[in-house]
Amino acid sequence: MPVGLGTRLKLARQTRGMTLKALAEAANCSESLLSKIENGKASPSLPMLHRIIKVLDKNIGWFFEESHGEEGMIFRAGTRPVLTLDPLRRGKGIALERIIPYSPGHLLQCNIHHVEVGGESAGPIQHVGEEVGYVIVGEVELIVGERSFHLREGDAFAFNSDLPHHYRNAGDRRASIFWVNTPATF
């Protein structure tokens, strides 16, 4: 059974010899919230998780999945893990369906971002790397830097991840985006 996010967060923090207070200050969040996350009583937003992993020098995928040492080649429909970060938004938000399961051996990260009506990413994030995506179904507003783009089925995008970026469902039905980035950051 995979280890939970909170347990892995605590392990990464302790391995680096950090106190909750030190991590909270470095990641610009409250010590109380970090404690709740470590104890499985709260979930971080995506921007907060990015700040935490940057401080801990980890890949976000490390917090969610275990690598079993055997890299597969085929990942069948219905068997891929689906990640949600905030339990309050599971029914109306964003779910990430892993196309490539997390493994230290993969240079790419690939997910299908399922975005419910009214769903949006938790705010602008930026990190090292490059991203490319393809809108499978629905409509999405992609904001990269100061620019906003309205994308529909069949539209694609590519940008440097060091630009602040976020997105939201801009239509009246669930949207799905095939999203690839490198290096693997989530």
Image (spheres, rainbow, N blue to C red):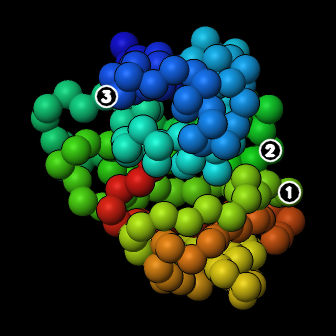
Can residue 1 be seen here?
yes
Nearer the observer, 132 or 128: 128
Q: Compared with residue 106, is residue 55 higher up or lower down, i.e. above or below?
A: above
Whether tag 1 and tag 3 are in contact, CB under 8 A, the answer is: no
Residue receiving disc 3: 66
At label 1, the amino acid type is Gly
Where residue 181 sits: x, y (%)? 40, 66
- Of the numbered discs 1 and 3, the one sitting upstream in the chain is 3
The image quarter in which residue 126 lies: bottom right
Q: Secondary structure at mark 2?
A: loop
Q: Which mark is residue 168?
A: none
Q: Residue at x 69, y 76 (%)?
A: 142
Residue receiving disc 2: 92
Local crowd at mark 2 within 10 Å, few (<14), some, or many (≥20)? some
- Of the numbered discs 1 and 2, the one sitting upstream in the chain is 2
Where residue 66 sits: x, y (%)? 31, 28
The image quarter in which residue 101 lies: top left
Quick check: 38 left or right of 132? Answer: right
Quick check: 76 left or right of 6? Answer: left
Q: Residue at x 22, y 44 (%)?
A: 104
